[in-house]
Image (tube, rainbow, N blue to C red):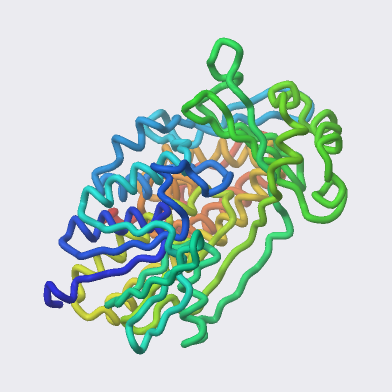
């Protein structure tokens, strides 16, 4: 591709759009980014409330490439594991990894977005705020953006468009008018509501800061993630129908009664429970599947625009950042945009499908299994097998969160490992008397050595 042809237009200046702009601009691309909202550095972040982001190794790797990891980690809070709050009282920290070298980081979407916007502009990308994508004439290579403050329309000639504009992607809708993308959306049947634990009277955290707190209650749950200003973002997940559900828990008084019954130790931590519950909207949850992510060499989708998922593995942002790294690499290797977009889709779609499936599975685990004796016994055995066979038996959570192995490989190996754990612990309440010779042989037989990470 000639230098004149190295021009990309990105729809969306959120996390993925700003990161991709940085990666491409640092490689010498001319990059224009169009964002429907105003500049959050000028008028404050208007993205609305959202479930806290859990930054893991895949996302950190992308931030390292962009040179923004240090700035982001300054604003993040380390989480060592899940702090499970049992229904009968008491707590237990279930570590995510072996030690503090394997942790995840709670980070504010707004603060992260601002760091990435600054980086994109420093790299040379041009960001146009208050520009909502309204129409795309693909044959003419013209995208129309509207400023909703005054209704003015702006015409933008483009070489190729990248949709980083989220689950409600305007570019995806425009592409659908030209080509059937095979779009399918599966609602979860559960939704969420956000609340807040404020700082303690002395300005510190009210509960253990270096953990993701979880109150599992079978068909529903509550979680709390720390913020660097010493607050916790609390997220209540309930079914849409049934009891309890968002059909029965409608008012602040209903929410207080639910917490008093099911989350009594959390109730005194949330002094504005009724106010938060009635003010904040109910957030919808679902999974977006597409059969096709690109339109020849003219447009391609990534992140939530291509594969929105439920948030229960904390990988939505990490997966989107990995998309950005992959797309930038394909664009560098392949001068033909159509070929680059096709190769990007071929690489990333199976992995997106795998993490979408694992995110759905993790909801059941978080709300229904983290306090189950069988699950805890399997976790105990999993840790021991990981120590005995470090090159073969790696917990699925570790492969997803602390490694950069393809999601599809982690999913496939995780299924084999879970089957082995269930088989080895069936009918047991402890690991006493376990036939280790048989189990070690089965690990060697069923799990080939893990490949080296690229």
Q: Position of residue 187 (x, y in %)?
A: 68, 64
Please state which of residues 98 and 202 is positioned toward the viewer in this rendering: 202
Which quadrant is home to the N terminus?
A: bottom left
Instruction: Classify 47 as above or below 371.
Output: below
Farthest-out residue, left: 2
Q: Position of residue 334 (x, y in %)?
A: 20, 75
Which quadrant is home to the C terminus?
A: bottom left
The structure residue drawn at horizontal position 38% and vertical position 76%, both measured from the top left corner, is: 143
The structure residue drawn at horizontal position 49% and vertical position 43%, both measured from the top left corner, is: 53
Q: In this image, 401 relative to 431: left or right? A: left
Q: Position of residue 223 (x, y in %)?
A: 64, 37
Q: In this image, 121 relative to 18: left or right? A: left
Q: How many marks?
A: 0
The structure residue drawn at horizontal position 51% and vertical position 62%, both measured from the top left corner, is: 148
Q: In this image, 324 relative to 165: left or right? A: left
The structure residue drawn at horizontal position 35% and vertical position 59%, both measured from the top left corner, is: 128
Please state which of residues 52 and 383 is positioned toward the viewer in this rendering: 52
Please state which of residues 49 and 370 is positioned toward the viewer in this rendering: 49
Report if residue 437 is visible in the image: no
């Amino acid at each position: 591709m000639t230098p004149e042809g190295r021009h990309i237009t990105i729809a969306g200046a959120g996390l993925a759009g700003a990161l991709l702009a940085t990666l491409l601009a640092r490689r010498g691309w001319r990059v224009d980014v169009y964002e429907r909202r105003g500049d959050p550095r000028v008028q404050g972040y208007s993205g609305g409330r959202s479930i806290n982001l859990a930054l893991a190794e895949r996302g950190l790797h992308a931030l390292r490439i962009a040179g923004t990891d240090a700035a982001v980690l300054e604003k993040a809070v380390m989480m060592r594991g899940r702090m499970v709050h049992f229904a009968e009282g008491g707590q237990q920290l279930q570590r995510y990894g072996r030690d503090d070298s394997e942790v995840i980081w709670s980070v504010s979407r707004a603060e992260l977005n601002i760091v990435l916007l600054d980086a994109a502009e420093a790299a040379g990308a041009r960001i146009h705020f208050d520009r909502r994508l309204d129409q795309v004439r693909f044959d003419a290579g013209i995208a129309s953006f509207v400023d909703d403050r005054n209704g003015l329309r702006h015409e933008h000639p483009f070489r190729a468009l990248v949709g980083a504009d989220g689950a409600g992607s305007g570019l995806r809708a425009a592409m659908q008018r030209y080509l059937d993308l095979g779009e399918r959306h599966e609602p979860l049947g559960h939704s969420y509501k956000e609340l807040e634990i404020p700082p303690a009277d002395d300005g510190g955290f009210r509960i253990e800061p270096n953990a993701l707190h979880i109150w599992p209650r079978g068909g529903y749950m509550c979680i709390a993630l720390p913020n660097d200003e010493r607050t916790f973002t609390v997220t209540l997940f309930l079914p849409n129908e049934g009891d309890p559900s968002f059909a029965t828990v409608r008012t602040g008084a209903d929410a207080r009664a639910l917490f008093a019954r099911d989350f009594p130790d959390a109730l005194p931590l949330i002094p504005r429970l009724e106010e938060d519950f009635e003010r904040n909207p109910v957030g919808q949850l679902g999974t977006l599947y597409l059969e096709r992510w690109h339109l020849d060499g003219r447009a391609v989708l990534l992140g939530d625009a291509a594969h929105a998922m439920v948030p229960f593995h904390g990988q939505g942002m990490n997966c989107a950042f990995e998309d950005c790294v992959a797309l930038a690499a394909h664009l560098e290797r392949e001068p033909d945009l159509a070929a680059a977009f096709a190769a990007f889709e071929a690489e990333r779609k199976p992995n997106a499908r795998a993490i979408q499936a694992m995110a759905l599975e993790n909801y059941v685990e978080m709300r229904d299994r983290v306090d189950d004796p069988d699950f805890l016994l399997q976790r105990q055995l999993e840790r021991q097998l990981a120590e005995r066979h470090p090159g073969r038996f790696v917990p699925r959570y570790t492969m997803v969160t602390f490694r950069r192995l393809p999601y599809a490989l982690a999913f496939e190996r995780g299924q084999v490992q879970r089957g082995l754990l269930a088989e080895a612990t069936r009918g047991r309440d402890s690991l006493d008397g376990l036939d280790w010779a048989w189990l070690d042989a089965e690990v060697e037989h069923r799990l080939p050595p893990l490949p080296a990470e690229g």
